């Protein structure tokens, strides 16, 4: 009997084949195999009817067609087909697409959150049917995102003529958060203030307090996975030099004594194990990984069987893992074993579909991992956090000393760790500050009294981890969308990274200002969060997806687009010197100087590769181009571009947009990721040559950049991976 296991990523194939053994064929879909077609009204690929949606799907590209062709052949050989796509809403939807395209009558859906023999075999032994509610939510998200992206971009963004390429349901709401913060920074006016302090001969420093906080001794730090460092202590703000001088003079002329000494033991519970957002935040703060890089490295760890599935919003841990951690602690750290297993509170709105992110085996220490440097660093972070989550609380002795000189009060606070607890594995505390033993009424020796002039600072821009934290708190997006959303904002040049912080560009600010006037509800985080809640309700089987989407379009989106179109047509959104007003003025109303300064496009005889219309030559000073211009299609809704290739002496579409030649694919897997190798023809020293490389563009840029097999006498060879003796590869 032959069983076929369909998975998403080829990187898992080897590990799964080893687990399942003979009698099993493992095939990868390479992610999504098909998508909504680009046809119909506004190229949506679906029709919105009365309470019903008719979708038209097509293979994603030439590679998708080849993958489907290969999978059809594999299905013919199999007696039973198991669908083991990723254990989330997107994975369920991919499984449904595979069922539809491969015409599978009764596929067995298996779900596991870790690639270990125990988990995989248990999943195979207990298959289920595809979850139609999860599929409905996945299809609804695809249609909703395309509806907002395509219609909003065509009918609003492109008509602004500011160079913006697109808008999106999650993308535009996230951009709005960044622009709100940027406007706060621009409107901020710095003010001078003074911090006043005294230093005592007894060995501690105290700060001026206009009013004392009665609970300061009981304050306990809360974990922050995106912490960017804490400011040094300072006094209450003193707003003038004269007042600061007066306080210093009192400190110098009056005797000092201890008014109160307070001490309290506080317990701080361990943090929860990682979910997607907290992993991205911690990796950003501690390893300086971007969210996108974090997810790529985590994907590699998951595929190698080292960690559980990395797209999750659940803080639950499987009972066997909790038991294993307890046994590990009993053997290696017995004082850190809590009286009962720690349970953590779920994040609001969490799906709890599977586990938190954790090691598959707690006994595989980070020092024993055979992986790349980045994978080892991230694994160590995940291992430490998972173990810490099951440890004892940290016990802190927090002290506060209040002193007095004349009528002025001063405060010193200290914190000492009496029992480290979970911080042996995950330290989220500031350094100890030890205060000396003091008694109430004790006189003190003044060593120094002074003030320091400072300035109020504007609110900081967000780092990528901080933005992920904010998106999660606002309910924008879900674990699988945080990293891609931030990546899109950077690729669209709406946002740039300056000194590690995300700063909206002038284009991003202009677009947000326009959308705030044209589609004000759509960019509000609360509005986007409501849509996410509706998708969650669909995933739980509580709401019909087609009815929700048709109602949403009829009652909100279609009228909103119509109103935005009227505003654009009448220029009613112009206000003062706003960016929107400048961007939406018709060409005839612009000043002669602005018209002259803008490069003029000229029509050429070159036909657009997408729609066949004549393309225009647009002058450009970009240093990235090989010529001083590029070609752009002026047809409504097309926007295709082509760039000059001086070597081939022809115009070409951007590489990422080219349709792969099916004949270029080989049957040989990439030695790094398992995707098929492709033939790449190039010219060197006037000779036509062929090399083999990974067929996945996104992998060639980073993961598989060293995969290159050059043509030689005995076949193809690689400086890193050796020789491929397969003569049939060359055509």
Image (cartoon, helix red, strand yellow):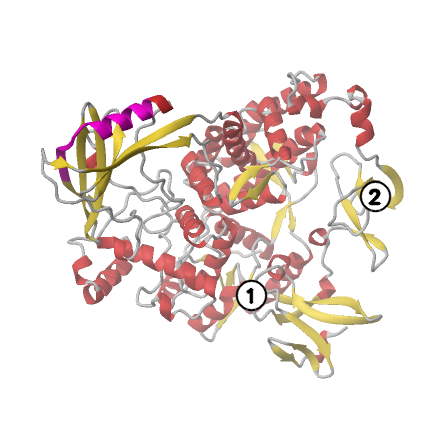
> Residue 126, which numbered label?
none
| Foreground pick, 8 / 704 | 704
Instruction: Look at the image and say whether residue 244 sits in the magenta stretch.
Output: yes
At 22% from the left and 62% from the top, the residue drawn is 329
Determine the residue located farthest toward the front in the rendered image.
253
Could you tell me which quadrant the C terminus lies in?
bottom right
| Foreground pick, 59 / 103 | 59
**What residue is shown with label 1?**
673
Q: Is residue 242 above or below residue 467?
A: above
Image coordinates for residue 463, horizontal then vertical, percent: 48, 43
- In this rendering, the count of numbered labels is 2
414 on left or right of 187: left
Element under label 1? loop
| Foreground pick, 424 / 601 | 424
**Residue 343 visible in the displayed image:** yes
Q: Is residue 416 above or below residue 7?
A: above
**Residue 239 visible in the displayed image:** no
Crowd tier of the residue under label 2, counting other residues whose Cα lies within 10 Å: few below 14, some 14–19, many 20 or above: few
Image coordinates for residue 596, horizontal then vertical, percent: 83, 29
Element under label 2? loop
Mark 2 / mark 1, whichever is N-terminal: 2
Crowd tier of the residue under label 1, counting other residues whose Cα lies within 10 Å: few below 14, some 14–19, many 20 or above: many
Image coordinates for residue 55, horizontal then vertical, percent: 61, 41
Image coordinates for residue 210, horizontal then vertical, percent: 26, 24
At 78% from the left and 22% from the top, the residue drawn is 590
- Highlighted magenta segment, given as a residue range: 243-263
| Distance between the alpha carbons at the discs numbered 2 and 1 | 37 Å
> Residue 612, which numbered label?
2
At 29% from the left and 57% from the top, the residue drawn is 425
């Amino acid at each position: 009997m032959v069983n076929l296991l369909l998975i998403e990523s080829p990187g898992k194939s080897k590990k799964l084949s080893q687990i399942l053994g003979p009698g099993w064929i493992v095939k990868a879909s390479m992610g999504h195999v098909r998508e909504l077609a680009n046809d119909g009204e506004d190229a949506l690929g679906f029709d919105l009817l009365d309470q019903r949606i008719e979708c038209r799907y097509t293979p994603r590209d030439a590679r998708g067609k080849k993958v489907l062709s290969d999978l059809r052949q594999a299905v013919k050989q199999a007696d039973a087909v198991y669908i083991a796509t990723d254990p989330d809403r997107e994975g369920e939807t991919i499984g449904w697409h595979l069922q539809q395209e491969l015409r599978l009558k009764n596929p067995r859906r298996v779900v596991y959150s870790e690639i270990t023999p125990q988990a995989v075999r248990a999943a195979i032994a207990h298959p289920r049917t595809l979850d139609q509610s999860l599929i409905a939510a996945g299809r609804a998200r695809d249609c909703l995102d395309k509806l907002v992206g395509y219609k909003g971009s065509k009918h609003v963004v492109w008509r602004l003529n500011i160079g913006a390429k697109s808008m999106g349901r999650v993308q535009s709401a996230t951009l709005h958060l960044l622009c709100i913060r940027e406007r706060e920074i621009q409107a901020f006016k710095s003010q001078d203030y003074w911090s006043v302090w005294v230093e005592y001969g007894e060995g501690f420093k105290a700060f001026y307090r206009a009013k004392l906080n009665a609970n300061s001794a009981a304050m306990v730090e809360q974990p922050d996975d995106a912490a960017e460092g804490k400011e040094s202590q300072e006094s209450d703000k003193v707003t003038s030099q004269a007042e600061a001088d007066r306080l210093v003079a009192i400190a110098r002329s009056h005797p000092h004594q201890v008014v109160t000494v307070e001490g309290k033991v506080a317990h701080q519970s361990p943090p929860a194990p990682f979910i997607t957002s907290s992993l991205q935040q911690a990796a950003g703060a501690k390893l300086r990984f971007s969210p996108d890089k974090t997810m790529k490295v985590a994907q590699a760890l998951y595929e190698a069987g080292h960690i559980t599935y990395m797209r999750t919003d659940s803080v639950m841990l499987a009972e066997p893992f909790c038991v294993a951690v307890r046994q590990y602690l009993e053997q290696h750290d017995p004082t850190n074993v809590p009286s009962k297993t720690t349970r953590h509170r779920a994040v609001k709105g969490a799906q709890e579909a599977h586990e938190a992110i954790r090691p598959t085996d707690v006994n595989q220490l980070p020092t024993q991992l055979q992986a790349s440097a980045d994978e080892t660093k991230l694994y160590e972070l995940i291992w430490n956090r998972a173990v810490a989550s099951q440890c004892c609380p940290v016990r802190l002795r927090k002290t506060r000393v209040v002193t007095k000189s004349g009528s002025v009060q001063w405060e010193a606070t200290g914190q000492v760790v009496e029992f480290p607890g979970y911080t042996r594995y995950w330290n989220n505390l500031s350094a100890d500050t030890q205060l000396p033993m003091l008694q109430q009424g004790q006189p003190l020796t003044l060593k120094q009294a002074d003030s320091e002039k400072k300035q109020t600072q504007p609110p900081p821009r967000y780092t990528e981890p901080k933005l992920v934290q904010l998106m999660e708190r606002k309910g924008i997006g879900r674990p699988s969308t945080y990293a891609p959303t931030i990546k899109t904002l950077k690729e669209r040049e709406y946002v740039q990274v300056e000194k590690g912080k995300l700063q909206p560009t002038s284009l991003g600010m202009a677009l947000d200002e326009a959308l705030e006037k044209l589609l004000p509800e759509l960019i509000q985080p609360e509005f986007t969060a409501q849509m996410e809640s509706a998708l969650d309700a669909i995933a739980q089987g509580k709401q019909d997806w087609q009815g929700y989407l048709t109602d949403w379009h009829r009652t909100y989106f279609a009228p909103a687009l119509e109103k935005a179109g009227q505003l654009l047509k009448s220029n009613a959104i112009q206000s003062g010197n706003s960016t929107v007003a400048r961007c939406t003025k018709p060409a005839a109303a612009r000043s002669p100087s602005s018209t002259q300064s803008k490069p003029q496009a000229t029509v050429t005889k070159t036909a657009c590769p997408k729609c066949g219309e004549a393309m225009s030559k647009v002058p450009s000073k970009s240093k990235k181009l090989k010529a001083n211009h590029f070609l752009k299609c002026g047809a409504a809704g097309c926007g295709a571009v082509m760039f000059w290739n001086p070597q081939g002496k022809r115009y070409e579409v951007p590489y990422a947009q080219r349709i792969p030649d099916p004949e270029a694919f080989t049957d040989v897997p990439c030695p790094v990721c398992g995707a098929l190798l492709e033939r790449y023809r190039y010219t060197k020293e006037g000779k036509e040559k062929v090399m083999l490389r990974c067929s996945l563009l996104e992998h060639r840029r980073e993961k598989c950049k060293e995969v290159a097999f050059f043509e030689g006498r005995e076949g193809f060879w690689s400086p890193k991976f050796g020789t491929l003796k397969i003569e049939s590869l060359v055509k």
